[in-house]
Image (cartoon, helix red, strand yellow):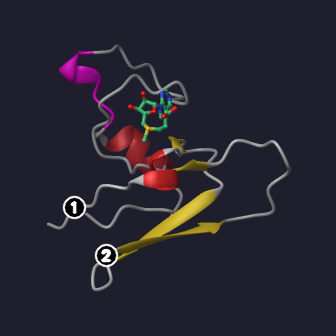
Amino acid sequence: MTQALALGLGSMFNHSLLGQNVGWKRNTETDVIVYTALRDIKAGEELCISYGSARLWFHDADAQVDTEWGDDDNDTGGETLAELELSGLGKMDL
Ligand SMILES: C[S@@+](CC[C@H](N)C(=O)[O-])C[C@H]1O[C@@H](n2cnc3c(N)ncnc32)[C@H](O)[C@@H]1O
């Protein structure tokens, strides 16, 4: 597994699984992450990427499922969010 830590502007994107409007792809040969608009984005609109459906480390304000913070039974890595993930858009290649 290869992991990456986005610095600079790349560290400013919030997560949205359902409302992501920016996709991203890592180039592990050049160590560059390329961000691409997934649709037309209005001025002032928040830019959101998907951090993936893996376990998140914060309470996701965007989550559409009943998640109780700190409860293993409610982690976001289960099938519920995976089913919601938009195919191929901003998906983490972990
Ligand atoms: C990479 S930073 C994103 C930028 C950050 N919001 C800032 O102002 O610097 C990741 C952090 O943003 C917050 N965050 C991102 N997406 C979120 C969401 N959907 N709901 C709640 N907090 C979120 C969490 O605190 C998370 O640890």
Picture mark count: 2
Q: Residues within 10 Å of mark 1 (few under 14, many from 20)?
A: few
The residue tagged 1 is: 3
**Is residue 79 among the parts visible in the rendering?**
yes
Residue 64 is labelled as none
Seen from the viewer's position, the closer of residues 90 and 75 is 90
Quarter the N terminus occupies: bottom left
Q: Which of marks 1 and 2 is in front?
A: 2
For label 1, the SS is loop
Quarter the C terminus occupies: bottom left
Residue, x 43% and y 62% (percent of image)?
A: 91
Cα–Cα span, label 1 and label 2: 11 Å
Seen from the viewer's position, the closer of residues 17 and 11 is 11
Q: What stretch of residues is rendered in magenta?
A: 70-76
The residue tagged 2 is: 31
Which residue of the protein is positioned furthest toward the front in this rendering? Answer: 8
Residue, x 42% and y 41% (percent of image)?
A: 81
Earlier along the polypeptide chain: callout 1 or callout 2? 1
Residue, x 81% and y 42% (percent of image)?
A: 44
Residue 39 in the image: state x and y as whole percent.
Answer: 75, 64
For label 2, the SS is loop
Which residue of the protein is positioned furthest toward the right in this rendering? Answer: 43
Which residue of the protein is positioned furthest toward the bottom in this rendering? Answer: 29
